[in-house]
């Protein structure tokens, strides 16, 4: 029987664009949706949404800072998810629905890392609470879609754009390329779990393959997706300095009230159930990322000189 194309909501974003490219290289043309081609308009689904056997919801623009100060962004993201779920649920086939959540913010701060999926949740930030609410919204539809919640670590890699207050590596490498100081916010010993975007999209491709091979019943409802390697901000700064090839000037700033405590993920369930694990070391991933940043900077310099 002919398999239906996957749907990617957020197809032009950091993760979504790489997933779409990977699917196309593998010979699968996804139904792709973004802000200019929304999945639902005036209560009507776009072509390809209801037909998909697996839908990837990667359409997130909310950052921790936006979640704190612009709650309307949270409401808009939730409304989009529910509108998409309503339409996908009408297919009558219980398709797989994959939601990108946040492994770094949804777990309770009193739970000692590394966090497994069974660890208690209890986010302390508006961003974490918003992500957990999206998870609950998806699970509410579990009788009509097969939910797969991916609790992602700090995803980084080539193509990630620097955003104010979000994406430490993107901001540090962009500053280094401009020969500007980098901003280190909060305690330099706070630990995070950094996972390369290619490893993340590799897992998404694995989920698509499981659906095509009629093995979707083997996929857990909640999966951590991280490297499992705790890295402090101080350690990350050393790695960035080594990739850039010089010691960076650092501006230290006080932590923000919504910043998380140290956290990293136990992703052994993804390994046991799907045979997935992150394979890109942070040193290698940062070197790749720095090379792409410098290539982009060179292109800008050439255009500026014309």
Image (tube, grey):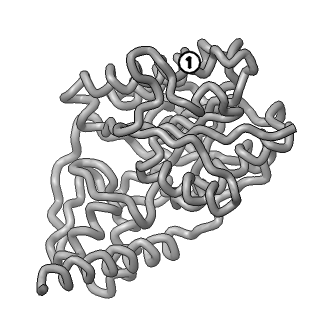
Whether residue 118 can be seen here:
no
Residue 265 horizontal/vertical position (percent): 58, 46
Q: Residue at x 67, y 35 (%)?
A: 54
Most foreground residue, 189 or 236: 236
Most foreground residue, 174 or 123: 174
Q: Residue at x 22, y 40 (%)?
A: 256
Label 1: few (<14), some (14–19) or many (≥20) C-alpha neighbours in 10 Å: some
Residue 65 horizontal/vertical position (percent): 24, 37
Q: Residue at x 47, y 30 (%)?
A: 39
Q: Is residue 61 left or right of residue 134?
A: left
Q: Quadrant of residue 145?
A: top right
Q: Residue at x 23, y 53 (%)?
A: 185
Label 1 secondary element:
helix
Most foreground residue, 113 or 105: 105
Residue 75 horizontal/vertical position (percent): 32, 20
Whether residue 5 can be seen here:
yes
Point out the image quarter for the N terminus.
top right
The residue carrying mark 1 is 87
């Amino acid at each position: 029987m002919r398999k239906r194309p996957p749907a990617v909501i957020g197809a032009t974003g950091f993760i979504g664009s790489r997933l779409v490219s990977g699917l196309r290289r593998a010979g699968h043309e996804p139904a792709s949706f973004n802000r200019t081609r929304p999945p639902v308009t005036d209560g009507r689904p776009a072509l390809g949404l209801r037909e998909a056997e697996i839908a990837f919801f990667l359409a997130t623009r909310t950052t921790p800072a936006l979640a704190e100060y612009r709650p309307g962004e949270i409401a808009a993201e939730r409304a989009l998810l529910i509108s998409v779920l309503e339409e996908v649920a009408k297919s009558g086939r219980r398709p797989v629905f994959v939601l990108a959540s946040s492994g770094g913010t949804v777990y309770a701060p009193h739970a000692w890392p590394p966090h497994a999926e069974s660890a208690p949740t209890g986010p302390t930030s508006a961003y974490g609470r918003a992500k957990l609410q999206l998870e609950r919204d998806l699970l509410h539809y579990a009788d009509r879609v097969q939910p797969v919640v991916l609790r992602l670590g700090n995803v980084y890699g080539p193509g990630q754009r620097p955003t104010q207050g979000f994406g430490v590596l993107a901001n540090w490498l962009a500053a280094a390329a401009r020969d500007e100081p980098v901003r280190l916010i909060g305690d330099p010993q706070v630990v995070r779990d950094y996972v390369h975007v290619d490893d993340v999209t590799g897992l998404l491709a694995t989920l698509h393959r499981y659906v095509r091979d009629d093995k979707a019943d083997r996929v857990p409802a909640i999966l951590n997706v991280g490297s499992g390697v705790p890295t402090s901000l101080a350690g990350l700064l050393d790695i960035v300095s080594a990739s850039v090839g010089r010691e960076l000037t650092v501006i230290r700033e006080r932590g923000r009230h919504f910043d998380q405590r140290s956290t990293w993920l136990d992703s052994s369930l993804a390994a046991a159930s799907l045979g997935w694990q992150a394979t890109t070391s942070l040193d290698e991933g940062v070197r790749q990322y720095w090379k792409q940043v410098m290539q982009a900077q060179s292109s800008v310099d050439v255009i500026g000189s014309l």
